[in-house]
Amino acid sequence: MKSLFVWGGIFLALLLTVSMFSGDREAPGSQIPYSDFKNRVAEGSVESVVLSEGRITGTLGNDQTFSTVPPPQDPQLIEQLEEAGVSYTGEQAEQMSLFWVVLINSLPFLLILGIAFFALRQVQKGGGAGGAMGFGKSKAKLLTEKQGRVTFEDVAGIDEAREELQEIVEFLKDPQRFSKLGGQIPKGALLVGSPGTGKTLLARAIAGEARVPFFTISGSDFVEMFVGVGASRVRDMFEQAKKNAPCIVFIDEIDAVGRHRGNGIGNSNDEREQTLNQLLVEMDGFEANEGIIIIAATNRPDVLDPALLRPGRFDRQVVVPVPDIDGREKILAVHMKKVPLAPDVNPRTIARGTPGFSGADLANLVNEAALLAARRNKRLVAMQEFEDAKDKVMMGTERKSMVMTEDEKKMTAYHEAGHALVSLNEPASDPIHKATIIPRGRALGMVMRLPERDNYSYHRDKMHANLAVAMGGRVAEEIIFGHDKVSSGASGDIQYATDLAKNMVTKWGMSDKLGPLMYEQSQEGYLGMGQSSRTMAGADTNKLIDAEIKDLVESGLKRATDVLTEQEDKLHLLAQALLEYETLTGDEITQLMENGKIDRPDAPSGPVIQQPTHGSSIPKAGKRFGGGEAPEGA
Ligand SMILES: Nc1ncnc2c1ncn2[C@@H]1O[C@H](COP(=O)(O)OP(=O)(O)OP(=O)(O)O)[C@@H](O)[C@H]1O
Ligand SMILES: [Zn+2]
């Protein structure tokens, strides 16, 4: 149970952090309306196009790309393109020959025939264990050292889990000796953790350390439509394991077979229950000193049948956590060994900027960075590549080619500047890592704040700061462009602020009027999944809760408004710098606020930014990580 709390806490922290990361400003695709396209052709801003079935893509004079959907017929198009001097290439669908038409139309039929034939053969071979490739044969894959030996060296940042499993390694190295000494030998261990945290890796490392064979199978491999097949696969798997003992059998996603029995509807469960029963029987059936260790992995221990967790089965549970900042640094180090690094690469900084990343995410990050370096014809992977790869992994690919109008860009710049400036003025806020108006994923821009360390709980002052920062974007839009011009781009900010305020009132006891009571209960809330619903609140209380939530968000709005009206000159300064540079680091923002300009070696001239007329002091301590983005375009 304790682990549930830990996971819940971690999840919550991630939620808070990650939700601030994700930009809210929604972007129009690079898709433009057909009429717009025609206008651009007429005004000569289109350079070249490719015409294909139902779609036209092309580039504009400034290298931006776009696509548009033409109407079924536009007889004037070619003429117009020629007139405007637009180069065009076409892909005309060829007339299909009759042979292909017939073949394609009969494909489904042939497919069904094939499947029926295959199934028949399998049934003839008998569903039980035995016959080569029979349905009942376990699909377990055997990995030996030929596939590469994994050791504890390859597993970083999860030392506690490693230590807990060390004993299993000792046992596998010499089962007899171990049992003579009277050691309590586990039969199975359950690794519990989110996807990508290294559960498979850890299990393989145990096998690698002990130099024993490693069988791997996924829980879903046992699940078949035909009753009895799963059970016979389980039998077969244990037979194989016994022949190869000492060895490790790794069952990934055990929840696919191990779900609580008898809470489903429909008979599709019969098969699963049989499979699970067989697994239980087999686990009871071998002696602990036979040298077989079953390691299973899941991220939903709460749904497992309690029978699986009883002594003599998976009685040992090992939590494999999402790595913290130090863990991330070590995992990065493991994977960075495989690529040539430039001297400027600082794993600590990367670790700081990747809260919530799993081991798999980090491995992916290093890989992406190496790919980027290769694409840029560099011999070494530098910090720049890691930064770009991080942004890519975190937020989807940068879309520089997206067509954003000047107005949208300006709106975005002020929106982001609003978030950033409020963040600077809230002492409890994390430091700004960077602010950008380059669109990525679905966000038009964003302000990222970096916690100095991983946060697993937040204080009230930080929550109030976050509410104000979230409102900063919308407030800035309103101050600069007026009440009627504010955009829908703040919807992500509003959602974030509302959720935060709601949790403060209904879960975290942070409303003085409502007191420290739990008004909201999560159902099946493991890892924060599942819904929550209000409990124990009568109609009056409900009204009060809603009013408190509104008050909290509005107090954030007021704090943001106060800061931004008072420091409007700084808002202009920051927004102009964003328009000029598109991305500013936290240091550059501080510099800008203090000196009114930015020193950038690669900038041709200093930015054309006027000195602020008066300077209000910006607290240097606590800043942080911020929210959102700007207005929705198009
Ligand atoms: N602690 C770690 N140290 C080093 N590398 C790691 C770590 N965790 C994950 N990785 C990297 O991520 C990859 C995927 O991890 P792995 O498959 O073990 O995760 P998992 O927890 O089994 O995920 P899933 O639940 O999705 O199966 C590994 O092959 C490894 O490259
Ligand atoms: Zn925003």
Image: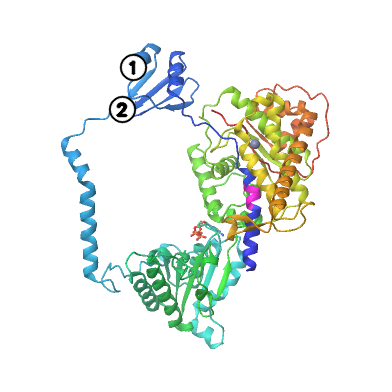
**Residue 330 locus on image (x, y percent):** 61, 56
Residue 78 is marked as 1
* Quadrant location of the N terminus in the rendered image: bottom right
User: Which residues fall within the magenta stretch?
Assistant: 14-18
Seen at 45% across and 24% down, the residue is 33
Badge 1 amino acid: Ile
**Front in this rendered view, residue 628 or 386:** 628
The picture places residue 53, in percent across and down from the top left corner, at 32, 29
Q: Is residue 455 visible?
A: no
Position of 101 with respect to 422 (left or right) is: left
Question: In terms of sequence position, does the residue under pointer 1 or pointer 2 come before the other?
Answer: 1
Q: Relative to 502, say whether 278 is above or below.
A: below
Tell me the chief SS of the magenta region. helix
Badge 2: few (under 14), some or many (20 or more) residues near its Cα, within 10 Å?
few
Q: Return the residue nearer the eye: 412 or 504.
A: 504
The secondary element bearing badge 2 is classed as loop
Q: CA distance from mark 1 to mark 2?
A: 14 Å
- Describe residue 518's horizontal placement relative to residue 311 as left or right: right
- Ligand 2's quadrant is top right
Crowding at mark 1 (Cα within 10 Å: few <14, some 14-19, many 20+) = few
Q: Is the CB atom of the residue marked by disc 2 within 8 angstroms of ligand 1's nearest atom?
A: no
The residue to which callout 2 is attached is 91
Image quadrant in which you'd find residue 218? bottom left
